[in-house]
Image (cartoon, rainbow, N blue to C red):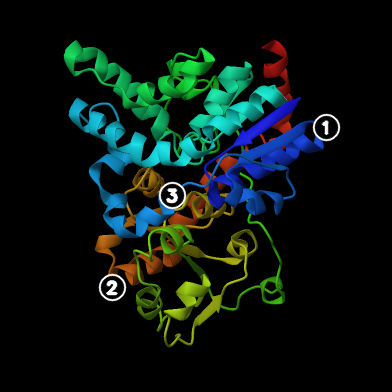
Amino acid sequence: MKVMFTCLPEKSHLYGQVPLAWALKAAGHDVLMPNSPGFTDAITRTGLVAAPVGGDNTLYSKLPAAREYQDMEVTNWSRLAQGEADWPTLRSCYELSVPLGYALYNDPVMEDMLALAESWQPDLVVRDPLSYAGALAARVTGALHVRMLWSADVYGRTRSNYVELMRQVPESERVDPLSDWMNEWGRPYGVVCDEELLQGQYTIDSLPPSLRLPSTLRQLPLRYQPYNGTTVVWDWLREAPKRPRICLSLGNMNTEAFGGDYVSIPTVLDALSDLDIEVVAAVLPGQRAELGPVPANARIVDDVALDTLLPSCSAVIHHGGWGTFCTAMVHAVPQLVMSTYIADQELRGRSLEREGAGFFVHHSEVNPAQVRAHVLRLLNDPQHAASARRVRDEVAAMPNAYETVPVLEKLVAER
């Protein structure tokens, strides 16, 4: 088979696709990853084949001036379920997200990606839920079209809710910015937007049943496999920690795209400074520069992969990112999520809290006393560790990437 993977030019989105892409490649299939030119090195460093298309987007240049964007009602997709959001809210959500999000990511690569797809003729397109260029590439070539999630499926759920509510309003109020945008791009290829184009024929979901959203879409469960890029097991990781080890990681997206973290690393370190624990803070160079004096019980590292660190940890404090969340889930580490409301981050955090495997705190409510209290509860109440192990066992029961390859082969053959 020829398999095309498409994603937003974000490392966390790419890294989620890598294990399945490598499993397909190891099974003898051709794998190609078209993306914007500036993302070429990120792809080739994974050992996979890149195909630069179009131009780079300008979204990052706009984000530092829009830090409040992450907490706006219309960017919190966690609260857009049926019964939670009315028609005006959902309409505003798409009216904002299409021109200021989806189009900024997809428009620069769309034309060239479609030309590449027509030339290469993939049999299967696996695409990020927000990579609508990948969706059109699948439709134009007749390839099997599979969405691969990097979140709870809030995008599929919200779209289904939008369509249902649109049927209920007067015809004069029915607007559909997402469909209009896709029709504009699809028209030269004879493509008319429909729900299969937007939702895919199948959806790969890596959340275990207890954390997964109910869905009427055809789902393919896939065990999450951590991939962190360049990875080294350092000597200090080869020995069991002498005290409970806590990982602190706020990721790179907020620092690199939004001009800074929403939670202060020094505040967290100070809150835990007198506890008999070891805090390992995985930081970026820019985050390290802002640290100041480091407490005696803290180790600052900038070259460690979470997949090598978290197995030795008793808890993790993080920003809610998909990769960190799922890597902790795989290693049964209780989590303290201190996040914004963007995308599905609140929903995942609340779901984890409901299952007893962690806590969710909005960044605006974070304070030293609360951080300390939550960490002590994660360490001292054995139910949190037990709940994290239960979620881990659910993940382990899901098909892995190599077991998923023959499923995809069969679906392509049937198509």
Give residue 28's mark.
1
Report crowding for label 2: few under 14, some 14 to 19, many 20 or more residues within 10 A (C-alpha). few
Q: Amino acid at mark 1?
A: Gly
Front residue of 362 and 286: 286
Mark 2 against mark 3, which lies toward the viewer?
Answer: 3
**Which picture quadrant has residue 222?**
top right
Q: Could you tell me which residue is drawn at 27 percent across and 55 percent down? A: 68
- Residue carrying label 3: 58
Disc 3 on helix, strand or loop?
Answer: loop
User: Percent position (x, y) of residue 92?
Assistant: 23, 33
What is the C-alpha distance between the residues marked 1 and 2?
A: 54 Å
User: Percent position (x, y) of residue 232?
Assistant: 71, 66
Vertical position of residue 321 compared to residue 100: above or below: below
Report crowding for label 1: few under 14, some 14 to 19, many 20 or more residues within 10 A (C-alpha). few
User: Percent position (x, y) of residue 47?
Assistant: 75, 49
Give residue 111's mark.
none
Left-right relation of 149 to 62: right
- Residue carrying label 2: 369
Image quadrant occupied by the N terminus: top right
- N-term mark: 3 or 1: 1
- N-term mark: 1 or 2: 1
**Which picture quadrant has residue 358?**
bottom left
Left-right relation of 170 to 16: left
Left-right relation of 298 to 2: left
Q: Amino acid at mark 3?
A: Thr
What is the C-alpha distance between the residues marked 2 and 3?
A: 40 Å
Q: Could you tell me which residue is drawn at 38 percent across and 47 percent down? A: 345
Q: Are discs 3 and 1 less than 8 Å apart at CB? A: no
What is the C-alpha distance between the residues marked 3 and 1?
A: 37 Å
Front residue of 176 and 36: 36
Q: Could you tell me which residue is drawn at 29 percent across and 50 percent down? A: 69
